[in-house]
Image: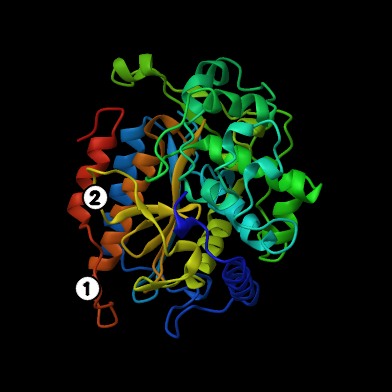
Amino acid sequence: MRSTHRRGRILGALSSFAVGALLLAGCTGGDSVPSPDKISNPMPDDVVEQMQSATERAITAGGGPGAIVGVWAPWIGEWEAGVGETEPGSGTAPSTDMTFRAATVTRSMTCDLLYAMDGGAVNLDDPVTAYLQSVPQLTDVTLVDLCNGVSGLRSSRDANWNFVIGNPDRQWDPREYAASGLGAGRGSTDSWSDSDTSFFLLGLALQNASHTSLGELYNQHIFDPQNLEHTYLPSDAPSTAGNNPLPGFYSSSKVQSNSCSEPPSDVSELSASYGYADSGVVSSVTDLRDYVSRQARSAGTSEDLAPRWSEMFPVSSDGEQWVRAGGGNRLNGSMLGQEGDILGYGVAAYSDIDTGLTVVVVLNNSAGGGTLAGALARELSAIAMEAPGDDAPETTLPWTADQAHDAVASAAKCPID
């Protein structure tokens, strides 16, 4: 195990305290990074038109009926909108206050728990076997390794996919779900891997260490202190995503092969046990806005990241090297957040560490996955960053709106353009 994984417990505890204090106080990591909830002036019409067009194109690319999006840029204003339809043929646009499954933003929240509990019920460098005796083969894996995505564990999703899509009401025991990834062998611990298994095990370990349910841990350490009123971890019982849910859909490979000429399947009813500590949380656009922006403001600067994010890894050895992951988050250039999917939804939520630009995207068809949602988030971010204005920041993103536009096309599951 690399020594860089095993930062001193004192440093870990101090960084956790500092991050928690910033989040609870609503302070900023930099003097000039504003909170997006203070931005109320509407964006110029021409910028809104560009963003509306980009969102409509991404909806088509994913085969879904609609989306809810929000963009908050301190220098140009805010745009928050429901685009398309709640369900095919409804003619009703999504409401911006609808709730949905937040997908892998849950990973970030699970790592928040780890850091909040560090120095108390657990320590960052504790072996996972201290809290999960059923995985003796993981004596070399620490809790922070699970959070950072460097445990070498494989994903459980692929092996369980047919069971999930065939019976979304099924209530999973987290150990049963994670067994698929554990049984697939270990990969490298010197690079990041996209492993839901890691977060299932991390959630179980934190539950066992605290003798408290995962949902209650989220409430105690994140949702209640941050006043995230519409964010919660549902029970395992099959349900929709809240009392005012954005319906969720999925276009199967068969539908995709027929150019998405058939309507997608309604998968709004789902057991959150399928997502658990990896992707089970339900939230809203404004809650995710507040959550990711607070986190970005606690992360230092892109040149001097707080310890939790100071060691991040490229998500692909041959892909864009400005896309990194660690600490339960992704870092696209200077934009910190997450992107991913759960059956029914593709979600991306990012906030720029240096400028305060914040973008939240939810597509209510998961066929395009987090890749499509992330590409749209980058396109909207670049449109905002490239918009002319006297107060526009001097910094630039490592991608252009045109490049993100092409990335949406590359992620498309249904015909566009």
Q: Residue at x 32, y 56 (%)?
A: 380
The outermost residue toward the bottom is 31
Q: Residue at x 38, y 46 (%)?
A: 190
The outermost residue toward the right is 211
Whether label 2 touches label 1, CB < 8 Å: no
Q: Is residue 97 visible?
A: no
- In this picture, residue 408 sits left or right of residue 118: left
Inter-mark Cα distance, 2 to 1: 27 Å
Q: Nearer the viewer, residue 216 or 288?
A: 216
Q: Label 1 amino acid?
A: Pro
Of the 4 image quadrants, the one containing the C terminus is top left
- In this picture, residue 3 sits left or right of residue 260: right
Circle 2: element type: loop
Residue 130: quadrant of the picture: top right
Q: Residue at x 50, y 63 (%)?
A: 308
Give neighbour class at mark 1: few <14, some 14-19, many 20+ (Cα, 10 Å).
few
Q: Nearer the viewer, residue 24 or 158?
A: 158
Question: Which residue position is annotated with label 1?
Answer: 388
Q: Please tell me whether residue 150 is drawn above or below residue 21 in the rendered image.
A: above
Question: Which residue position is annotated with label 2?
Answer: 320
